[in-house]
Amino acid sequence: MRILHTMLRVRDLERSLSFYTELLGMKLLRKKDYPSGRFTLAFVGYGLESEMAVIELTHNWDIRQYEMGNAYGHIALGVDNIQTICESIAAGGGNVVRPPGPMKHGSTVIAFVEDPDGYKVELIELASRTSED
């Protein structure tokens, strides 16, 4: 068994695709409209779905607002230079909600960004990651 994807419901598919592809550097792997169900699925990721987990962005055409709930946490991405990545995201109009720095009670350097729908994405600097964090 392996994880295939994580699904996020999004209000504005094009805005979300821009965030994940332009600011986070993912590739649009596939996208399909389902007119009879009035929704579109778009899959983004850093590699082939056959080899790694991806994110499914689901756009329901008739829904304008979602409730976030309090159970969702975040998606985590490993990065090589967290400061440069955060600067690039901010320069591209992205929202860095927690600037790079050591995690509370640990030494791993992390940051958080927020996608257009308010989903949190944790960035973890791989070089600073230790087995205790």
Image (cartoon, rainbow, N blue to C red):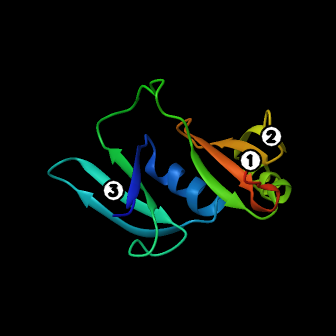
Tell me if residue 19 comes above or below residue 103 in the rendering: below
Q: Nearer the viewer, residue 48 or 60?
A: 48
Q: Position of residue 81 (x, y in %)?
A: 82, 62
Q: Position of residue 8 (x, y in %)?
A: 42, 45
- Residue pointed to by mark 2: 106
Q: Nearer the viewer, residue 130 or 25?
A: 130
Q: Secondary structure at mark 3?
A: strand
- Residue pointed to by mark 1: 132
Quarter location, residue 23: bottom right
Q: CA distance from mark 3 to mark 2?
A: 38 Å
> Within 10 angstroms of label 3, few (less than 14), some, or many (20 or more) residues?
some
> Within 10 angstroms of label 2, few (less than 14), some, or many (20 or more) residues?
few
Amino acid marked by disc 2: Gly
Left or right side of 10 for 127: right
Left or right side of 72 for 23: right
Q: Secondary structure at mark 2?
A: loop
Residue at image point 66% right, 46% down: 122
State if disc 1 and disc 2 touch (CB < 8 Å): yes
Disc number lying in front (3 or 1): 1
Q: Position of residue 121 (x, y in %)?
A: 61, 45
Q: CA distance from mark 2 to mark 1?
A: 8 Å
Marked residue nearer the N-terminal end (2 or 1):
2
Q: Position of residue 105 (x, y in %)?
A: 80, 34
Marked residue nearer the N-terminal end (3 or 1):
3
Tell me if residue 60 comes above or below residue 24 in the rendering: above
Disc number lying in front (2 or 1): 1
Q: Which quarter shows the N terminus?
A: bottom left
- Residue pointed to by mark 3: 41
Q: CA distance from mark 3 to mark 1?
A: 38 Å
Residue at image point 75% right, 60% down: 126
Marked residue nearer the N-terminal end (3 or 2):
3
Q: Residue furthest front?
A: 132
